Amino acid sequence: MALDLSTEANARLAELRMEVAMANWMLPKAGLVTMHSGNASGYDVEADLLFIKPSGMDYEAITPENLVAVRVTTGEVLTEGIRPSVDLPHHLFLYRNVEGVRGVIHTHSNHATAFAALNRPVPLVLTAIADEFGAEIPCAPYVDNEGEHIGEAILKYRNRSPAILMGNHGVFAWGSSPKSALKAAIMTEDVAKTVWLASVLGEPKVIPAEEAEKWYDRYHNRYGQ
Ligand SMILES: [Zn+2]
């Protein structure tokens, strides 16, 4: 890959490669994927580069070095001899069209995808959902995987939540880093599982918007170190 970057940029990109590799390694560890059915990427705005999982590669075979590098403005694949994930167009679309996104994850994680099979959002019925997502996790209607159909549906149907269900398909999650996208993907599966269990017991109760706002505000503005 013919890139003339400063030492500082190279150090930053090496760190991003490691973070993307770790996000991909975590997908099977967190129980979000079976076989090769998920992928993670990360984006460096200054270098105009993203790194994404190679297509159909076993997660344990992924290294920071064999991730595929792609020029974000042009979509040009810079790594020779390794094809990027077939979901690259959707990752590119999110980086190009959603402000502040630096990490994207796609999975077919079971409980969340069960909601997607019903074309149903994960309702705002838990404080954990209010904390992380600040709203229900929406579900876009079914679209095929041609061109920008998935990206456009995400843009049209997303709310403030850093994740969305794609009808009859699975989950897209994003964040300000690959790590925060991974957290959104893991939390999506976790809350979908709890809501599914609650639905077996009865009808989950929706948290009023003004109450949800309190949890979201505390979590995003006052929680942690
Ligand atoms: Zn998929």
Image: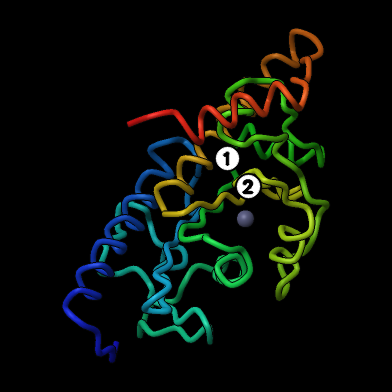
Please state the horizontal and vertical placement of residue 219, each as a whole percent of the image: 51, 30
**Residue at numbered disc 1:** 109
Q: Tell me if label 2 and label 1 are in contact, CB under 8 Å.
A: yes
Circle 2: is it few (<14), some (14-19), or many (20+) Cα within 10 Å? many
Q: Amino acid at mark 2?
A: Val
For label 1, the SS is loop
Picture coordinates of residue 34 (x, y %)? Answer: 50, 44
Q: Position of residue 102 (x, y in %)?
A: 46, 61
- Residue at 36 percent across and 82 percent down: it is 79
Mark 2, residue position: 171
Q: As drawn, which residue projects farthest toward the top?
A: 201
Q: Quadrant of ligand 1?
A: bottom right
Say whether residue 50 is left or right of residue 16. Answer: right
- CA gap between label 2 and label 1 equals 7 Å
Residue type, mark 1 in image: Ser
Question: Which residue is nearer to you in this view: 23 or 31?
Answer: 23
Which of these two is toward me, 22 or 206? 206
Q: Nearer the viewer, residue 147 or 153?
A: 153
The C terminus sits in image quarter: top left
Residue 158: x and y in percent read: 72, 51
| Residue at 71% from the left image edge and 76% from the top image edge | 147
Density class for disc 1 (Cα within 10 Å; few <14, some 14-19, many ≥20) is many
